[in-house]
Amino acid sequence: MRTSSRLWALSLAALSFAIAGCGSSSNNPPQSRVRVINAAIGATGGQSVDVQLGGQTVFTNVGFGQESNSVTVNSGTGIVAKALLAGTGTSVVSGPVNIQANVDQVLLVSGVTGGIGTLGYQVVALSPQDYSSTPSGGQIRVYFINASPTNQTANFSYTVDSGAVQTNADLTNVTYLQMTPAQLPTFGSTTFTATVGGEVVNSTPITTTGGKTYTVVLTGRTAVGGANPGLALQVIQNN
């Protein structure tokens, strides 16, 4: 074979390899940053959980009312999410979730032992949260989640530096397993409030920091029947 023919053959082989390499990279699925918030209630109170995605244990020992660290996972539709009693391997609920690509997304585990219908254990994917953009000067970003399995809606509000009570339509009649759109209050000493039926619960005052993102989670159940744990607001700083 002449030298020019050999060079042509080698160039063609290299081009074919490069094309094959490009094709193989497309097999890598897009990813997302996922956190778990645990609001599951066991027979005697809050229940810690492990969470599997697609058969792999991704989150371990997430305590009641707590949020896990963020973990990067493959995104996709119909991914099987399973919540288990922490450290036991005993599954309490399993179901498909949709994880969007290239976002920060929350998986919420909620429900009560022996709950009927929607009050039973569930694992659901909430809408993405925005951690990438910074609120305008003097503001914070806040999401509110109703994770209280009571079959009742919740009304949320807040006060900053002992000022007037602030609320709006986004924070009114928030259904179970719903997360509100982001709110942009000013920062300062902030008390968050939730009302469920005739019962009111307040967070401890939180000194918020401008530009940060927070999630306020309503957990527990109303006092009717002496339910344990009772209503509480968990305030989580996300970044």
Image (cartoon, grey):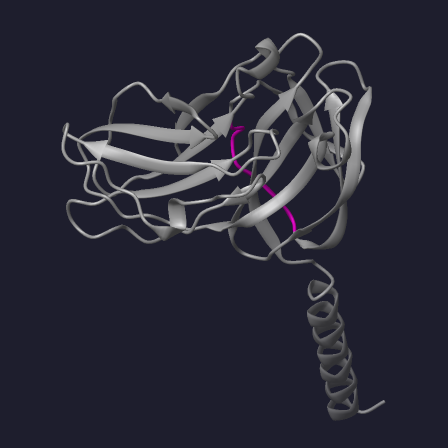
Front residue of this view, candidates 153 and 26: 153
Vertical arrangement, residue 167 with respect to residue 42, above or below: below
Vertical arrangement, residue 200 with respect to residue 181, above or below: above
Question: Residue lying farthest front?
Answer: 198
Counting from the top left corner in percent of width and height, residue 69 is at: 51, 30
Q: Quadrant of the N terminus?
A: bottom right
Which residue is rendered at x = 51% and y = 23% of the image? 66
Counting from the top left corner in percent of width and height, residue 181 is at: 42, 51
Which residue is rendered at x = 19% and y = 37% of the image? 187
Res. 210 image quadrant: top left
Q: Is residue 44 left or right of residue 69?
A: right
Tell me, yes or no, whether the highlighted magenta stretch contains residue 172.
no
Counting from the top left corner in percent of width and height, residue 233 is at: 42, 24
Whether residue 156 is visible to the viewer of this picture, yes or no, is: yes
Vertical arrangement, residue 226 with respect to residue 216, above or below: above
Counting from the top left corner in percent of width and height, residue 153 is at: 52, 39
Front residue of this view, candidates 141 and 196: 196
Tell me, yes or no, whether the highlighted magenta stretch contains residue 70.
yes
Q: Is residue 24 left or right of residue 106?
A: right
Which residue is rendered at x = 64% and y = 24% of the image? 40
Q: Is residue 137 left or right of residue 184?
A: left
Query: Which residues are the magenta region?
Result: 67-74
Q: Quadrant of the C terminus?
A: top left
Whether residue 131 is visible to the viewer of this picture, yes or no, is: no
Res. 121 image quadrant: top right
